[in-house]
Amino acid sequence: MKCDYGCGKEAQHQFKNGKWCCSEYLAKCPAIKNKNSKGNKGKFKKGEHPNCGKKPWNKGIPRTEEEKVLISKRTKEEMLKPETIEKIRETRPNFKKEKHPRWSGGYYNSNIPMYNTYAIKISYAEKCRRDPNDKNILQVTCAYCGKWFTPGVLSIYERIRSLNGKNHGEQRLYCSDKCKIECPIFHQISYPKDYKPSTSREVQAELRQMRFEIDNYTCQKCNKHQDELDTGLHCHHIEGIRWEPLESADIDKVITVCKECHIKIHKKYECRYNDMRCGK
C-alpha cells in the first residue's frame, strides 16, 4: 500500500482520519514537506485556500490524559535532541549584551532606575537629579530626611502609579526603613492621625531636612551619625512649639537628635509632654 498523500513511498502508519502515510508524523511526509515549502507560501490569497472554511477533523474532540502525557513526553524528547537545539539557535538572533537593542548597561537588571526613563514622569512631584558618579542613574530626595539617594525601579514605578491615581496611598520614597518608620505621615491612610508615639510629632518636612543637612545628619547630644543608629533622626524644638508658635519655623530654634535622646530630653523637668500642655 502506497502513501495516500502522493509521495509514492510505502505506507506505514494510519491516522485517525483513515488515511495511510509513509511516516508517523504528517509533516515528515515528502509530499507534505514540498507542499508546505517556502516556495509555496503566499500561493493562495485570503479565503481562496481549499481548506478555508472547513472544520478541522479534531475540533471538539477532547484529548485523553494518556494522549496529553504522550504529547508532552515526545515534545520534551524532541527538544533535547542536538539537531533541534541547533535549529533553534540558527533561527534566533545571537546578540551580545552590549549589542542587543534593549541593552541599557544592565541598570534594569540591577534594579537601578534610569534618569532619562523616569525623571520626566516624576519630576513634577519629586526633586530629581542625575547621580554625580553616573549621569544615567536617577536620584531623588528622601521624603523624611531630604537626603539624595537612588531608589529601586519598583519603588519609582509604584510612586508614579500613586501620582496617577492608580495605587493605594502615596507610596513616598524613603532612603531607609529608619526614615520610613519615623516619618509622621507614613501609613496615615491605614491608621488614624497621630497614632504614633509623641516623639514622632515633629516639625515641617522642609525645616527638618534643612536642619539635618546643617547638622550633617548627626545627633547633637550623643554625636552619633544616622548610619550608626538603629532608629531615625528627629528634629527637636529647643523651645516648646505650643508656647512659641510664631518661632516654630525658625531654623535656629531646632536641633537634630536621635530618638533615644529625644525621649530623654522630654523626660526632664518642665520639658515633659505633660508640662508643655496649654491647659494651665
Image: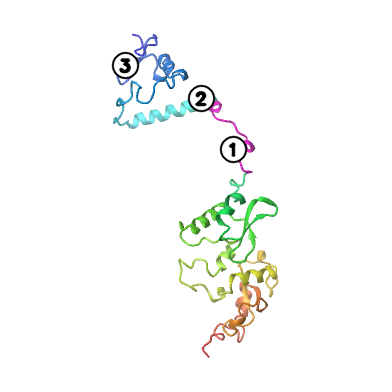
Residue 18's image quarter?
Answer: top left
Circle 2 packing at 10 Å, graded few (<14), some (14-19), many (20+), is few
Tell me, yes or no, if residue 114 can be seen here: no
Disc 2 target residue: 84
Disc 1 target residue: 101
Residue 89's image quarter?
Answer: top right
**Extreme residue in the front direction:** 45
SS of the residue under disc 3: loop
What stretch of residues is rendered in magenta?
87-105
Indicate the amino acid at tag 1. Answer: Pro
Of callouts 1 and 3, which one flags the residue occurring earlier in the amino acid sequence?
3
Tell me, yes or no, if residue 14 can be seen here: yes
Mark linked to residue 19: 3
Of callouts 1 and 2, which one flags the residue occurring earlier in the amino acid sequence?
2
SS of the residue under disc 1: loop
Q: In front: mark 1 or mark 3?
A: 1
Q: How many marks?
A: 3
Q: Is residue 90 magenta?
A: yes
Of callouts 3 and 2, which one flags the residue occurring earlier in the amino acid sequence?
3
Circle 1 packing at 10 Å, graded few (<14), some (14-19), many (20+), is few
Do the CB atoms of the residues marked 3 and 2 lie less than 8 Å apart? no
Q: Position of residue 54 (x, y in %)?
A: 30, 25
Residue pictured at 64% horizontal, 38% vertical: 98
**Extreme residue in the bottom direction:** 280
Mark 3 and mark 2: Cα distance apart in space: 28 Å
